[in-house]
Amino acid sequence: IEMVASAISFALLHLARDAQLRAQLHEDPAQIPAFAEEIFRLEPPGPAIPRVTTRDVQIGGVTIPARSAVWLALEAAGRTNGGEEISRGSNGEIRRQRHWAFGAGMHRCLGMHLARLEMDTFLTEWLNRIPNFELKPGFTPAVAHKPTSVTHLRRLKLRW
């Protein structure tokens, strides 16, 4: 629940800062799942995951010995092709970019389907009821960045 709450707060922050994006999702709720995936990509609540190498691995010319503790930076993995912004097609629709917010393979998050459902449902209901909102004037969001825990906003002050 903490990770979904974090993702929801980052989604609301993006929407509060972008009236055009808010209007687009309010008018076409079918794009909300793609927007949610983009939030998971850009602001993964679990930004890194611990692993142990099973053999010597070479990355960027550096050898990491077998049985080394490493942290996989999920927040960096999702930015290679999609950049720092919500990805859009030439027609302006939101495009889902590949991301690793839920891990992969045998370590894939068991709750990913529930997280997506919660995110989509929350955003749909929020935009139906509160389509126009913004950051409270003078408020500057602060991120609590914890690579070994959940990254979240310390608080989010909105006005509608």
Image (cartoon, helix red, strand yellow):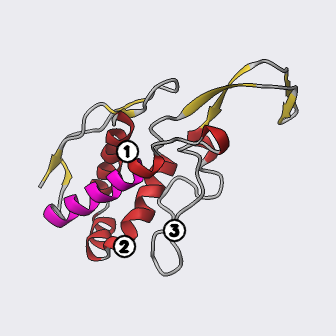
Compared across the picture, whether 45 is left or right of 124 comes to: right
Q: Is residue 81 positioned above or below 109 on the image? A: below
Q: Is residue 130 positioned above or below 61 on the image? A: below
Q: Where is residue 130 in the image (x, y as percent from the top left)?
A: 15, 61
Taken as a whole, is the magenta stretch helix, strand or loop? helix
> Alpha carbon of mark 2 to alpha carbon of mark 1: how far?
19 Å
Mark 3 neighbour class, 10 Å CA radius: few under 14, some 14 to 19, many 20 or more: some
Residue type at mark 3: give it.
Answer: Arg
Compared across the picture, whether 28 is left or right of 159 comes to: right
Residue 60 image-quadrant placement: top right
Residue 7: numbered disc: 1
Residue type at mark 1: give it.
Answer: Ala
Residue at the spot 11% in from the left edge and 55% down from the top edge: 160
Q: Which residues make up the magenta segment?
A: 115-129
Residue 30: numbered disc: 2
Which of marks 1 and 2 precedes in the sequence? 1
Residue for badge 3: 95
Residue at the spot 57% in from the left edge and 32% down from the top edge: 48
Q: Nearer the viewer, residue 29 or 104?
A: 104
* Disc nearest the viewer among 3 and 2: 2
Does dot 2 land on a helix, a strand or a loop?
A: helix
Residue type at mark 2: give it.
Answer: Ala
Q: Nearer the viewer, residue 144 or 108?
A: 108
Does dot 1 land on a helix, a strand or a loop?
A: helix
> Alpha carbon of mark 3 to alpha carbon of mark 1: how far?
18 Å
Q: Position of residue 47 (x, y in %)?
A: 52, 35
Mark 1 neighbour class, 10 Å CA radius: few under 14, some 14 to 19, many 20 or more: many
Which of marks 2 and 3 precedes in the sequence? 2
Which of marks 1 and 3 precedes in the sequence? 1
